[in-house]
Amino acid sequence: MSATANSELVERFYREVINERKLGVIDELLSDDFVHNGESRGRDGQRQIYEEFLTAFPDLQTEIVEIFGCDDLVAVHRRWTGTHEGTFQGVRPTGRKVDFESTAILTIRDGRIAEYRGVLDMLTLMEQIGEARGTAF
């Protein structure tokens, strides 16, 4: 696939899986042996993560801020917004709005997303639901 087609694949993944809640698309767009930050999750493991996230933030939306592809790699920077209405990472629902970012490099193999390497601004997310506490120094 071309770099453009790979970028379109990633755009479709986030649009349909997150914004449209079509979790069945995971079977079509992720490889059987999908790897997330070095952890072999496969499709089922990744689907479970998204189910938990979407249960905790049922109105979660993601916006692609920047995306570009080169050969079999796609870099994507996203902004996420939603409301904490379900338990997340052991934190009971707070009803608070969240707004955080993530950046990733995805590897495309045989027309499917095979690997995700990235970071999600978990500190900001946890602060917004009232769980991250730091000290100034």
Image (spheres, rainbow, N blue to C red):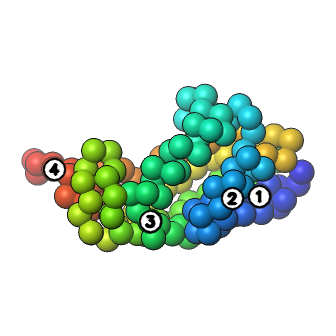
Q: Amino acid at mark 1?
A: Leu
Q: Amino acid at mark 4?
A: Arg
**Mark 3 or mark 4, which is nearer the start of the sequence?**
3
Residue positioned 69% across, 58% down in the render: 13
| Residue 2 image position (x, y, % from top left) | 88, 54
**Mark 3 or mark 1, which is nearer the start of the sequence?**
1
Give the vertical position of 123 relative to 7 (above or below).
above
Residue indicated by mark 1? 9
**Closer to the eye: label 4 or 3:** 3
Report whether 42 appears left or right of 73: left
Report whether 38 appears left or right of 31: left
- On the image, which quarter does residue 82 sit in? bottom left
- What separation in Å lies between label 4 and label 2 (alpha carbons)? 33 Å
Residue positioned 71% across, 31% down in the render: 33
Residue indicated by mark 4? 133
Dot 4 falls on a residue whose secondary structure is loop
Give the label on residue 58, or none. Answer: 3
Residue furthest to the right in view is 1
Give the vertical position of 50 relative to 117 (above or below).
below
- What separation in Å lies between label 1 and label 2 (alpha carbons)? 6 Å
Residue indicated by mark 2? 13
